[in-house]
Image (cartoon, rainbow, N blue to C red):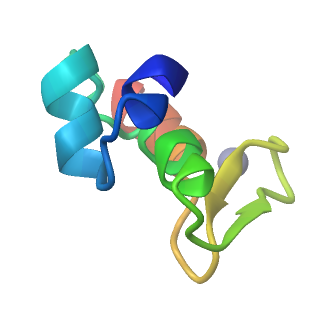
């Protein structure tokens, strides 16, 4: 996905089209905030699992784990 950004993808949707991020079984919930952070959106680490997440959002990883159970 880094290559997609270097190749000119400017938004999460554009990166998704190039790499398939956001189209897998997790729907981008695991990797979406990683991509957004690379695109310059504000990201902080989850207090529970240390996963990068958008500032002010719920942690996608903890949220995903809850849905798995
Ligand atoms: Zn978390």
Quadrant location, the N terminus: top left
Q: Which residue is drawn at the image coordinates 29% and 55% (left, top)?
A: 11
**Front one among 14 and 23:** 14
x then y, percent, for residue 52: 70, 49
x then y, percent, for residue 25: 22, 16
Residue 53, compared with residue 51, is above or below; it is: below
In the displayed structure image, the side of residue 33 where residue 51 appears, left or right: right
Count of picture labels: 0
**Front one among 62 and 32:** 32
Q: Which residue is drawn at the image coordinates 37% and 25% (left, top)?
A: 4
Q: Is residue 23 visible?
A: no
Residue 61, compared with residue 48, is above or below; it is: above
Quadrant location, the C terminus: top left
Q: Which residue is drawn at the image coordinates 28% and 35% (left, top)?
A: 15
Residue 9, compared with residue 55, is above or below; it is: above
Q: Which residue is drawn at the image coordinates 29% and 25% (left, top)?
A: 21
x then y, percent, for residue 42: 65, 73
In the displayed structure image, the side of residue 42 where residue 45 appears, left or right: right
In the displayed structure image, the side of residue 17 where residue 37 appears, left or right: right
**Front one among 62 and 12:** 12
The image quarter in which residue 44 lies? bottom right
In the displayed structure image, the side of residue 43 where residue 17 appears, left or right: left
x then y, percent, for residue 58: 53, 67
């Amino acid at each position: 996905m880094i290559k997609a950004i270097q190749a000119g993808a400017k938004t999460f949707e554009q990166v998704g089209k190039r790499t398939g991020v956001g189209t897998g079984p997790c729907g981008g919930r695991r990797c979406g905030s990683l991509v957004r952070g690379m695109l310059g959106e504000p990201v902080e680490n989850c207090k529970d699992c240390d996963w990068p997440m958008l500032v002010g959002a719920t942690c996608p990883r903890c949220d995903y784990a809850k849905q798995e159970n």
